[in-house]
Amino acid sequence: DVKVTQSSRYLVKRTGEKVFLECVQDMDHENMFWYRQDPGLGLRLIYFSYDVKMKEKGDIPEGYSVSREKKERFSLILESASTNQTSMYLCASSLFPRFHTNNSPLHFGNGTRLTVT
Amino acid sequence: AQSVTQLDSQVPVFEEAPVELRCNYSSSVSVYLFWYVQYPNQGLQLLLKYLSGSTLVESINGFEAEFNKSQTSFHLRKPSVHISDTAEYFCAVSLRGGYQKVTFGIGTKLQVIP
């Protein structure tokens, strides 16, 4: 079974802090994603990566950056945390590379609930 | 760009009754369609998917969904729900080809009442 591990289940940070959310997958997946989940808004894509050192903006990238130095690890960075970034953050991975004719499902971690005070 | 509309934010239903969770999508090109389920305090997991072929797809726990291209819908159904089906259900779409970028609906909370 694919395992996607998010390093923290709960985080509490202060406004202005730099925050790192870490995600590791163990199945050699090509693609990795960061979503945030908010009540009434569903999941919104922040950033995704289809290869090491490659990244693409999702629908709401403002205030975030990402890093993918190794295939198995995808980090989400909040450069200066703000209260409107309080949310549940979900990391996901999927197998097939871009332009593949098939489509593989997303495998999710259990999420990191971030509170910014 | 693609979008997904889930028309009901919450659906209460009695145990052993049938349920339908509605999903409509919008896209100018062909799509793949998915339903994901999120149990309390967990991440999402795939329930079923439509890639091609038969428009009726089924999950291992009795759910089914039918792709209707003319109505751009992918409604999820189960003829008899159990308490264990209480969860939040997300409809999702991705475009054929290109990046595997998945767009989710806002979710429907299914509450099964004993």
Image: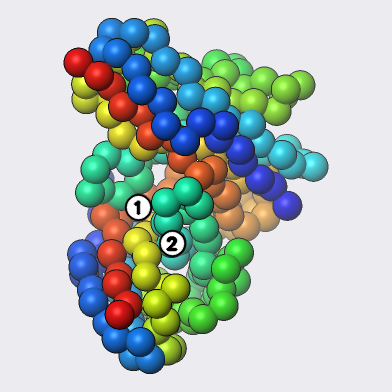
The image quadrant where one finds the N terminus of chain A is top left
* Image quadrant assignment for residue B16: top left
Indicate the secondary structure of the residue bearing disc 2: strand
The residue at 47%/48% (across/down) is A40
Q: Is residue A86 left or right of residue A98?
A: left
* Image quadrant assignment for residue B4: top right
Where in the figure is residue B2, as x and y percent of width and height?
69, 47
Mark 2 crowdedness (10 Å alpha carbons): few <14, some 14-19, many ≥20: many
The residue carrying mark 1 is: A108
Where in the figure is residue B34, as x and y percent of width and height?
51, 35
Q: Is residue A67 above or below residue A88?
A: below
Q: Is residue A104 left or right of residue B37?
A: right
**Residue flagged by tag 2: what amino acid is it?**
Arg
**Residue flagged by tag 1: what amino acid is it?**
Phe
Mark 1 crowdedness (10 Å alpha carbons): few <14, some 14-19, many ≥20: many
The residue carrying mark 2 is: A36
Q: Is residue B71 left or right of residue B20?
A: right
The residue at 35%/52% (across/down) is A108
Chain to which the residue tagged by mark 2 belongs: A
Mark 1 or 2: the one toward you: 2
The residue at 31%/49% (across/down) is B43
**Could you tell me if residue A40 is visible in this image?**
yes
Q: Is residue B103 above or below residue A9?
A: above
Count of labels shown?
A: 2
In the image, B47 versus A14, the foreground residue is A14
Q: Are marks 1 and 2 in contact (CB under 8 Å)?
A: no
